[in-house]
Image: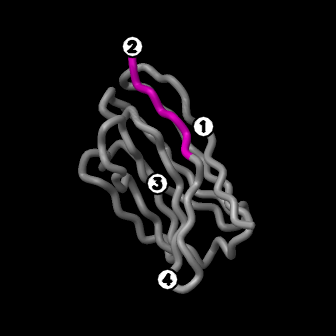
């Protein structure tokens, strides 16, 4: 059974930081590209950051320079370090694992709220 379990969300003031974690089980983690998506109320889900199996990274333009994605294959975990958070970063953040032949999986999401 595949599970992606996100943690680390919460309420933070503008300019603050959070670190999200996504622990994977039931998959050969090192073979998967991992990503973080987010969905704000009334908006479509959007890609925030991706890290491939060979650790190539890419980011949405509106988080470049503020967010950093990383992975630890020994712990089957992907992280999203979020700095200088803005109110427009408020959303539910989802972890995604994707491999062309093995499948595409999602976590249940973790709420991030940026507000004073």
Classify 10 Å Cα crowding around label 3: few (below 14), some (14-19), many (20 and above). many
Q: Mark 1 sits on what residue?
A: 8
Identify the residue at the far top of this view.
116
Q: Secondary structure at mark 3?
A: strand
Q: Mark 4 sits on what residue?
A: 100
Residue at left offset 42%, top offset 52%: 37
Q: Mark 2 sits on what residue?
A: 116
Query: x, y percentage for residue 18?
Result: 51, 34
Front-most of 109 and 42?
42
In space, the residues marked 1 and 4 are separated at their CA atoms by: 28 Å
Query: x, y percentage for residue 59?
Result: 33, 57
Q: Secondary structure at mark 1?
A: loop
In space, the residues marked 3 and 2 are separated at their CA atoms by: 24 Å
Mark positioned earlier in the residue sequence (3 or 2): 3
Mark positioned earlier in the residue sequence (1 or 4): 1
Query: Does 72 appear above or below 104?
Result: above
């Amino acid at each position: 059974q595949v599970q992606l379990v996100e943690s680390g969300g919460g309420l933070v003031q503008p300019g603050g930081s959070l670190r999200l974690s996504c622990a994977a089980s039931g998959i050969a983690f090192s073979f998967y590209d991992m990503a973080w998506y987010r969905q704000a109320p009334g908006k479509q889900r959007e890609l925030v950051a991706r890290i491939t199996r060979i650790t190539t990274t890419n980011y949405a333009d509106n988080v470049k320079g503020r967010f950093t994605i990383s992975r630890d294959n020994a712990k089957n975990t992907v992280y999203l370090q979020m700095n200088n958070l803005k109110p427009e970063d408020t959303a539910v953040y989802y972890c995604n694992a994707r491999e062309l032949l093995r499948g595409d999986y999602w976590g249940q999401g973790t709420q991030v709220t940026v507000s004073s």
